[in-house]
Amino acid sequence: MADVNTTGSEVATVSETKAPESTEPAPAPFPENADKDFEQRYINDKWVIRYANGGFAKLEDDEWKYLDEGEGELMQQLWFEQIAAETQIIDGVKHVWDREKQEWQRVQEIDEDFIANYQANYGVDYDYSKIEVKKPDNVKPQEKEKNEQKKDKNKIPQKGWVDNELNTSVYVTNLPPDIDEEEFHEFMIKCGVVQMDPRSNKPKIKLYRNQDGSLKGDGRCTYVKQESVELATTLLHESMFKGSKISVEEAHFEMKGDYDPAKKKRRLTAQQKKRFLDQQNKIFAWTPDKPRSYRPKSDCVVILKGLFTIEEMEANAALMLDLKEELSKSCAKYGPVKKVVVYDNNPEGVASVHFSNTEHSDLAVKSLNNRVVDGRLIQAHLWDGRTKYKVEESEEEAKKRLEKYGQSLEANEESEDTSDEHESDSHEEAEAKTDDDDGEEEREEGQQDVASSQ
């Protein structure tokens, strides 16, 4: 077991640290006239006390003797050496020897770092006496909702200026008469992201017009963040815009005329609100940069062209299913095939094969591109993720195509029935011929038996 010095240059665990050597007898009685504020230690086989004013006294022959200045300085040095021996750095933490419990006690210094670490792990020490505690409401939730609905119905619309706590709109005046919404949008985005209208999916800006369609010279812009309003009123106010000195201020909304509930916009559903907020939050979301070796999911899809013609597909309705099965089997040697799609109405004869990763799709393109199959030149490449190979057709075109498929199915059934009849006829002829051969053999055997008997 190694000793640990007081400077902290060596670090040891509690189990490896020696206890300070001590042969203290029972504590001596304190002097009757001594101050109450003092400490007592056993130094050099004698009891010593240290007063709050820095003076020392030692016990000799059951009497306390006060030390002079010279002896006091020497005793002070011995006093602090003993304190240093009882202080150790264990596992990087300061420990002090407890003489009563005969064990090392951890000492935690309360400093700024300790307070900051404590608050980071356990939170800030709030004064809960100042927090208002709401009394429990005995009203049932259903009755509470009904009461709130009644309040909303009986609520009279507020007239005059109506301010919203989370107002993110600015009102702009003295605009040039020859601007449009696009120019106004480009000018206002200098101070923040303009909010999109969830119904029209267009920027939430407006240029006010007269009844004849001409511009009034004022407009409104709604931002996503409230901080953009302060920026716009500070930076864009009294700035020049196409030769006009504009004025920008926080927007206030005033109800003109009587309240007409028919003009109120339809509320968004919960799903529409969620979709709108998700799209809006994506603008401010941070996404890490993609690695250099990143490849999109579309690279896992192989596009094959020149597999069939429209005439062949219309003549044989089962060709699409046969192609799917054949492509699944033939492409499985390059890697696991997740899905095969045949675009039967595409004039280029297109089919797509979906692999699980880009290694398999790259191998398939390398092996299948410019290969000749049944006299056709097959072209293979990776999907770009944008091109759509399904050809949109009208109801009449789809109906005609289905009718041709039906005719081809009927023709296939008739051909199958004709082939079955031919097969049955040939089978009957073969059976009749077999019967004739058997009769001739029996007659020949009878003639041979008669000749042998003669």
Image: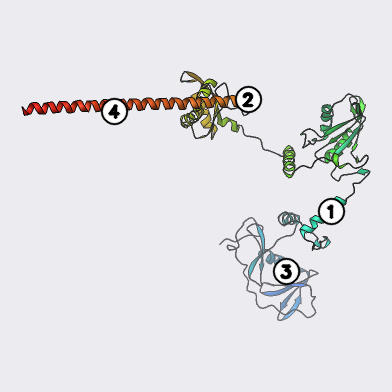
For marks 1 and 2, give the CA distance. Answer: 55 Å
Residue 311: x, y in percent? 53, 20
Residue type at the position of mark 1? Lys
Say whether residue 309 is left or right of residue 427: right
Query: Considering the numbered disc 3 on the image, is that residue within a helix, a strand or a loop?
Result: helix
Which residue corresponds to mark 3? 75
Which residue corresponds to mark 4? 431
Residue 392 visible from this viewpoint: no
Q: Residue at x 59, y 33 (%)?
A: 297
Residue type at the position of mark 3? Met
Residue 202: x, y in percent? 78, 32
Residue type at the position of mark 2? Glu
Q: Residues within 10 Å of mark 4 (few under 14, many from 20)?
A: few
Foreground residue among 294 and 114: 294
For marks 1 and 3, give the CA distance. Answer: 86 Å
On-image quarter of the C terminus: top left
Foreground residue among 145 and 227: 145
Q: Are dots 4 and 3 in contact, CB under 8 Å?
A: no
The label on residue 396 is 2
Residue 453: x, y in percent? 6, 29
Which residue corresponds to mark 1? 150
Residue type at the position of mark 4? Glu
Of tags 2 and 4, the one toward the viewer is: 4
Of tags 3 and 2, the one toward the viewer is: 2
> Where 112 sits versus 359, above or below?
below
